[in-house]
Amino acid sequence: MKTKSLRGRDFLAETDFTREEIETVLAVAERLKMERAMGIYHDTILRSKTLFMLFYNQSLRTRNSFEAGMTQLGGHAHFLDPTKIYTPALEGKEVAYSTERVSDVARVLSRMGDAIAIRCYGDPVEWEYGGANKLLREFAKWSDIPILNMEDDIYHPFQGLADVLTVKENFGGFKGVNFTMSWAYSPSVHKPRAVPQSAILYATMLGANVTLAHPPEMALAPDIIAKCEEYATAAGGSFRITHDFAEGIKDAHVVYPKAWCPVQIYKPPVGDDDIEAAQRIFDSHKDWKCTEELMDTADKEAIYMHCLPADRAYEVSNYVIDKTEGPGWRSVVFDEAENRLHVQKAVMSLVM
Ligand code: CP
């Protein structure tokens, strides 16, 4: 188990960590979860420590799981609204007296606290794919304390950790587990790719048999796909892509359908900066909805997963998301949401 190597590290992307390090995080999360259920307190682990949380986008789960997690570990989390401070901006994107250069913000907060967590994707970086990740990496360059990625435009590494912890709890591990990450229809095209990209990276890294299902226009980033292929080979699992929703779900143990944007939404050179075209593509795939009939074709012990918030009645039927008990397949979305708390406490305990 690798623990010492994690101290002081940024948590920006799962690809920055070895499989052994990720397995350490999951083991620590399982222990913290079990001990909390037993009434054991963990409030000496990060006593008197401060986490600064900078949200360029809205959040229910991420904000509250980090904030509750810091309280449970004996520290405190500050919520920072970028519009109520001088909005941290990259060099060249600054506006006099309404922004402050990231290098200055990172160095100031480094003098006062113990980690900085940031969420940024989409509109705040004008849908420049990778622009938010660049912002987080600039923070990391200047900060003396760990930077934690609460979702950027490439990775949602804490959601992915909660996802794989949920799979491990249900199947005991990843070998032989058929993990289907699928696109599903939503009326809103404003959905970053971070959740599916992190989910397939973790699942291949840990040795699952991963299927990525999506309409042809909803391809994920080529470098992420290449990394999944590399992980699957190294871990002895598999990775494939299908454009057939029903075929992707058939016999799956894990069914994880959610919307993500097509490439047209992004600024050139990645996309066309054409939100209307992106919306038209979305609206031509309304039949990609997870229904009871589809879930009945999955493995009989299958779990339905979603990072939430879900677009009920579009991405998924109410029956599917609300069927949280067996017999047969069931929805584990609230276990998955709870696991955000435990994995984040594990990472914070290890890196801060
Ligand atoms: N899954 C997730 O990140 O939820 P929030 O957007 O509510 O934080």
Image: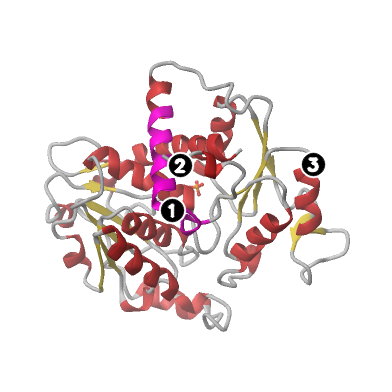
Mark 3 lies within 8 Å of ligand 1 (Cβ measured): no
Residue 217 location in percent, x, y?
Answer: 36, 78
Q: Secondary structure at mark 2?
A: loop
Which of these two is toward me, 295 or 251? 251
Quarter of the N terminus within the rendering? top left
Q: Is residue 209 left or right of residue 22?
A: left
Residue 211 lies in quadrant: bottom left
Looking at the image, the residue that sits furthest to the right is 97
Residue 24 location in percent, x, y?
Answer: 42, 40
Res. 309 in view? no
Dots 1, 2 in contact, CB < 8 A: yes
Task: Give the foreground label among 2 and 3.
Answer: 2
* Residue at 61% from the left image edge and 63% from the top image edge: 132
Q: Amino acid at mark 3?
A: Arg
Label 2, residues with CA under 10 Å away: few <14, some 14-19, many ≥20 = some
Q: Which residues are magenta?
A: 13-32
Structural distance between the alpha carbons of marks 2 and 3: 28 Å
* Residue at 48% from the left image edge and 79% from the top image edge: 264
Structural distance between the alpha carbons of marks 1 and 3: 30 Å
Relative height, residue 66 to residue 255 (above, below): above
Relative height, residue 271 to residue 318 (above, below): below
Q: Which residue is mark 2?
A: 2
Structural distance between the alpha carbons of marks 1 and 2: 9 Å
Q: Which residue is mark 3?
A: 111
Res. 175 in view? yes
Residue 138 location in percent, x, y?
Answer: 69, 61
Q: Which residue is mark 1?
A: 18
